[in-house]
Image (spheres, rainbow, N blue to C red):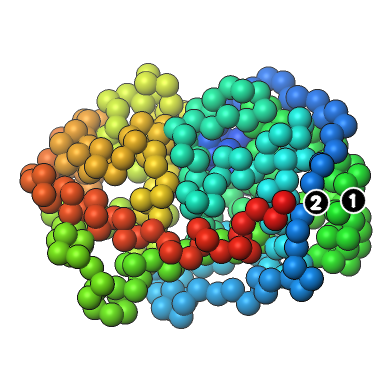
Amino acid sequence: MPTFYSQQIPEQKLATAWLVMLAAVGVIWLGSCGKEESEQHGSGEVEQSLVPQLPSVPFEYSLLGFPEEWLTDPALQLFGNIGSDIGITDDGATLGRVLFYDPILSSDGAVSCASCHSQANAFADDAPHSIGVSGVPTERNAMGLFNFRYQRRFFWDMRTVGLEEQVLEPIAHPDEMALNLEDLPGRLAAQSYYPELFGAAFESTDVTVERVASALTQFLMSMRSYSSRYDAGRVNGFVNFSESELAGKSIFFNGDSRCNQCHSGLNLFSNQPFINGLEVDYEAAGDGGIGELSGDPFDDGRFKTVSLRNIGLTAPYMHDGRFSSLREVVDFYADDIQHHPFLDERLGVSGFGTPGQAPFQLTLSDEERMALVDFLNTFNDTLMTSSWWLSDPF
């Protein structure tokens, strides 16, 4: 059966239509809000009272790279360099860093991209629903931001193709940053620090919407996560793991739990969206995911499959932030998957074949569940959450 994800709605048509509508259906930066509002806030004159504190020589963002095993991994090669074809420059990513943290990009000068994407939380929001300019909570939880080289579609409903096509939407969305994009260049050019930053990044002080998108994309593409205790363990034979973490690792990869069937490879993710059995009827529960765009019952509740990297830092979980802890997530997948007419077959009793099977149940003791939680926490990055070149420059 054809679905939205398999091109029932052409990619370019979908991305263009939704950009015109300026609806940020995903997070505040990459997937929070759910539905379009009818009005956009105005953009009164606001002046930033702070200036960014930047090094005299830009950080060498252009030299950042993924480990060789990532670049040669056959599965990841399928997705490599699809987040964006924009090249990263030191000055371009530096400008993007300032833009990401600058509340001047919002209509009231109070909300930045980082307001809902905290570095300490792997650039996710620790609230189930983020609060932007309007004060109206978003309908979807804000995902963590990293490893965009291996992502092609964005937002929980995967409606936007390409990172540079996505980054402007939250700025314009009325519940998020609520700034009219046509006013964005003038707003930025009026700040004392932007002409020089744009001049360094683009060899011209002209501020344009396209250059804003390019700089933000470069900074986001620099958010790379591959420095975790799990990564260290893969090198040293997991001698750094506790007994409980080793037990959780065995459960995760043993095939019976089916954890790594949906969260696989070095990036611990899938490029496909799944129906994971949170609801019997997602649309009736308030959010049909991709089904709200395609109108196909097959897509009811189909959402993006997020990477498990940094999973211990990005609570709460699921598209609506319904689970506050990893233990709740483990308990759900072990005991409480709901029957859905198109439940992904990997969550059905047989684990393969046609979707819509009766949900499987995984018999795990309390000790095994805690071991799995302990193992999941080894995916937390030990570098990106403390790197100064990803931090607030103001």
Instruction: Label 2, secondary structure: give it.
Output: loop
Q: Residue at x 61, y 40 (%)?
A: 115
In the rendered image, residue 166, in percent from the top left (x then y), is placed at 63, 46
As shown in the figure, which amino acid type bears the numbered disc 1? Answer: Ser
Residue 36 appears left or right of 77 = right
Neighbours of disc 2 within 10 Å: few (<14), some (14-19), many (20+): some
Q: Is residue 364 visible?
A: no
Q: How many marks?
A: 2
Residue 316 placement: quadrant: top left
In the rendered image, residue 106, in percent from the top left (x then y), is placed at 74, 36
Identify the residue position indicated by label 2 in the image. 51
Instruction: Label 1, secondary structure: give it.
Output: loop
Q: Nearer the viewer, mark 2 or mark 1?
A: 2
Identify the residue position indicated by label 1 in the image. 192
Q: Is residue 255 above or below residue 136?
A: below
As shown in the figure, which amino acid type bears the numbered disc 2? Answer: Val
Residue 43 appears left or right of 306 = right
Q: Are marks 2 and 1 in contact (CB under 8 Å)?
A: yes
In the rendered image, residue 300, in percent from the top left (x then y), is placed at 38, 31
Question: Can you say which quadrant of the picture contains the N terminus?
Answer: top left
Task: Give the camera-side residue of 99 and 86.
Answer: 99
Q: CA distance from mark 2 to mark 1?
A: 8 Å
Q: Is residue 175 above or below residue 305?
A: above
Q: Residue at x 34, y 36 (%)?
A: 324
Residue 266 placement: quadrant: bottom left
Q: Is residue 120 visible?
A: yes
